[in-house]
Image (cartoon, grey):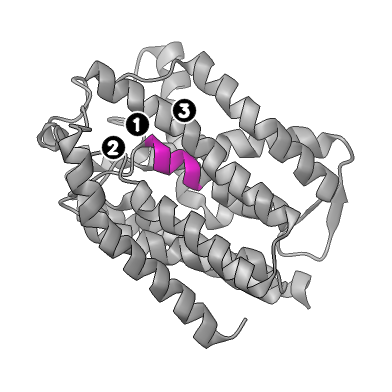
């Protein structure tokens, strides 16, 4: 796809989301769809209570409409793109239900862990099945080697789908953080799909980047709106679908290093506390630890985005053996 076309798609999505932003914010305020901060959470975050949430519609609507439009114009509808749509918007439904319960209860509680896992399995199993049918092997980064896994690929794919959707959700705890990190991750997949000539997927990534850039105008510190679980879980679904269909599931650990670090910090914190009654971090996920260390939200976004950029560069370098 030519550079001018890529730019047109990105700018279209950006303009769409920027125009949509004030309308969505006003509508959510009218419906009193407001964020409720946990009482046991950071004291500095209590000022965020009352900020509109579920703002992901600002980028999800352009992702659905513009991707469909550009793909239709080029006659490029494929099963793979439908899988990406199913993953993105299937997980967004789970997030929507979770957010809806929080808003109705006016408390920071949504789906129970079992309900959430059931929903993720409902969406994740078909995706993992298709990823496995698409290819039973997995590419080892920085090599030209593909490891044949057979039916075990399904288990790895399913774990990756659920883990990634949760990981992006955990990253969404500081103004603009999940948005900024995911823009860069989509940037990697825009490059990869371009190199592999997967035009329909490339269109999706450019629309996603443009939509998120527009959303960032309202989500950057101090945020006028939050994406909510309806957005963060959906973004995880989109990222892991792209990874699975391009056989780059292992690259999520590199390109999405922040997702991995946020998840690992929570896991280690819980396990260590259960065993010793003490904490490794001042608070988990990781971004909260740095907040309690005195870092501003803007500094966290800058540092975590820089780490992601390094991961993206490493990811691109790892492709040399595969593409050539």
Please state if 152 lies on the left or on the right of 247 as rendered.
right
Q: Secondary structure at mark 1?
A: loop
Marks 3 and 1, how far apart at CA: 9 Å
Residue at 44 percent of width and 12 percent of height:
274
Nearest to the observer: residue 195 or residue 92 = 92
Query: Which residue is the site of mark 2?
Result: 289
Residue 207's x, y, as percent? 48, 65
| In the depicted structure, whether residue 258 falls above or below residue 42 | below
Residue at 43 percent of width and 21 percent of height:
270
Q: Is residue 322 visible?
A: yes
Residue 79's x, y, as percent? 74, 53
Nearest to the observer: residue 191 or residue 257 = 191
Q: Secondary structure at mark 3?
A: helix
Query: Which residue is the site of mark 3?
Result: 268
Residue at 51 percent of width and 61 percent of height:
186
Discs 3/1, front = 1
**37 part of magenta stretch:** no
Residue 203's x, y, as percent? 57, 68
Q: Which quadrant of the figure has residue 180?
A: bottom left
The numbered disc on residue 258 is: none
Marks 2 and 3, how far apart at CA: 13 Å
| In the depicted structure, whether residue 265 falls above or below residue 314 | above
Residue 183's x, y, as percent? 43, 61
Query: Which residue is the site of mark 1?
Result: 284
- Considering the image in quadrants, where does the C terminus appear? bottom right
Residues in magenta, as a range: 229-235
Q: Main secondary structure of the magenta part?
A: helix
Q: Residues within 10 Å of mark 1 (few under 14, many from 20)?
A: many
């Amino acid at each position: 796809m030519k550079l001018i076309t890529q730019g047109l798609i990105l700018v279209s999505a950006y303009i769409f989301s920027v125009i949509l932003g004030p309308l969505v914010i006003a509508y959510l305020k009218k419906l009193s769809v407001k964020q409720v901060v946990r009482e046991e959470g950071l004291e500095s975050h209590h000022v965020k209570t009352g900020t509109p949430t579920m703002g992901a519609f600002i980028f999800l609507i352009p992702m659905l409409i513009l991707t469909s439009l550009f793909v239709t114009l080029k006659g490029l509808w494929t099963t793979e793109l439908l899988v990406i749509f199913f993953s993105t918007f299937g997980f967004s439904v789970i997030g929507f239900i979770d957010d809806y319960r929080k808003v109705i209860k006016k408390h920071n509680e949504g789906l129970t862990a079992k309900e959430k896992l059931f929903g993720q399995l409902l969406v994740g199993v078909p995706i993992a099945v298709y990823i496995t049918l698409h290819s039973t092997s997995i590419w080892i980064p920085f090599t030209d080697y593909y490891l044949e896994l057979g039916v075990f690929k399904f288990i790895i794919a399913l774990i990756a789908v659920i883990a990634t959707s949760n990981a992006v959700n955990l990253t969404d705890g500081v103004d603009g953080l999940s948005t900024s990190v995911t823009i860069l991750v989509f940037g990697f997949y825009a490059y990869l799909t371009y190199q592999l000539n997967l035009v329909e997927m490339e269109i999706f990534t450019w629309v996603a980047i443009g939509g998120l850039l527009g959303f960032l105008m309202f989500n950057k510190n101090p945020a006028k709106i939050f994406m909510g679980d309806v957005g963060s879980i959906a973004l995880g679904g989109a990222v892991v679908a792209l990874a699975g269909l391009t056989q780059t599931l292992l690259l999520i650990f590199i390109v999405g290093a922040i997702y991995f670090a946020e998840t690992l910090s929570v896991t280690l914190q819980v396990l260590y506390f259960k065993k010793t009654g003490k904490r490794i971090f001042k608070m988990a996920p990781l971004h909260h630890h740095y907040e309690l260390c005195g870092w501003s939200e803007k500094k966290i976004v800058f540092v975590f985005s820089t780490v992601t950029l390094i991961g993206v560069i490493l990811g691109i370098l790892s492709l040399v053996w595969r593409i050539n």
